Image (cartoon, helix red, strand yellow):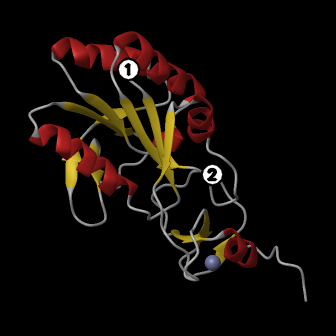
Amino acid sequence: MAKLYFHYSTMNAGKSTVLLQASHNYRENNMDTYLLTAGIDDRAGQGRIASRIGIDAEADVFRPGDDLQVKIKARLDQGRVAAVFIDEAQFLTKDQVWQLARAVDDLRVPVLCYGLRVDFQGNLFEGSAALLALADEMREVRTICHCGKKATMVVRMDDQGRVLTEGDQVQIGGNETYVSLCRYHWREAMGDLPDC
Ligand SMILES: [Zn+2]
């Protein structure tokens, strides 16, 4: 049975590295894979998935209006693929996650999504919320806070290192940086700890 997978993490946990390694394992065994990433994020160049440790691979892109079941069907018509990999899955719309679920069920191809769970304000992304609801299997790609606890949250900082508490959920191409923290240290950074 094909399944819909959601591998979620916070920023800088290495989820693109995990994706590229998993895809590589198929290709090494002469099984083709179909890679997709968000058209919204072209830091690695349009249609490229890159990891911070230096490995990368070509990928097709998805945009908000795309029907991903149609896109996957078109790719399968060109030749068999063992699995579909989706990076930046937090940028999927709810409709697109349903399209992926139908692709899994009706086209019988495994779809493995990799994305961020929550934004810098602690809210679920649309794609991640839908994947948490619909995925057959979920796995956490872990990273740690500076205190050594598991990081589950992320703060956005400006180029002066100041923590930003407001702003758009998606900001691409600015000078902001992101730091992954445990919830306690995220609350401290956001000014949410009680005075004591
Ligand atoms: Zn911490």
Residue placed most toward the observer, 175 or 130? 130
Residue 147 versus residue 160: which sits nearer the camera? 147
Residue ID for mark 1: 1
Residue 71 on image: x %, y %: 34, 19
**Which residue is at a point 61% across and 44% down the rendered structure image?**
125
Residue 68 visible, this orientation:
yes
Is residue 45 something that shows in the picture?
no
164 versus 18 height, above or below: below
Neighbor class of circle 1 (other Cα within 10 Å; few <14, some 14-19, many 20+) is: few
Q: Classify the position of the C terminus by image quarter.
A: bottom right
Helix, strand or loop at disc 2? Answer: loop
- The residue sitting at 60% across, 37% down in the picture is 132
Q: Is residue 55 above or below residue 155?
A: above
Residue 107's spot in the image, x, y percent?
A: 35, 12
Q: Left or right of 50: which side holds 79?
A: left
Q: Quadrant of ligand 1?
A: bottom right
In the depicted structure, whether residue 65 falls above or below residue 188: above
In the rendered structure, the answer to whether residue 126 lies left or right of residue 60 reads right
Which marked residue is nearer to the observer: mark 1 or mark 2? 1
- Where is residue 18 shown, x and y percent of the image? 32, 53
Residue farthest to the bottom, as pictured: 196
Q: CA distance from mark 1 to mark 2?
A: 35 Å
Residue with the mark numbered 2: 169
The numbered mark, 1 or 2, whose residue comes first in the sequence reads: 1
Q: Classify mark 1 as within 8 Å of ligand 1 or not, answering yes or no.
A: no
Task: Work out whether residue 60 or residue 112 is closer to the camera in this orientation and state it.
Answer: 112
Q: Quadrant of residue 81?
A: top left
Identity of the amino acid at label 2? Gln
Residue ranking furthest to the front: 1
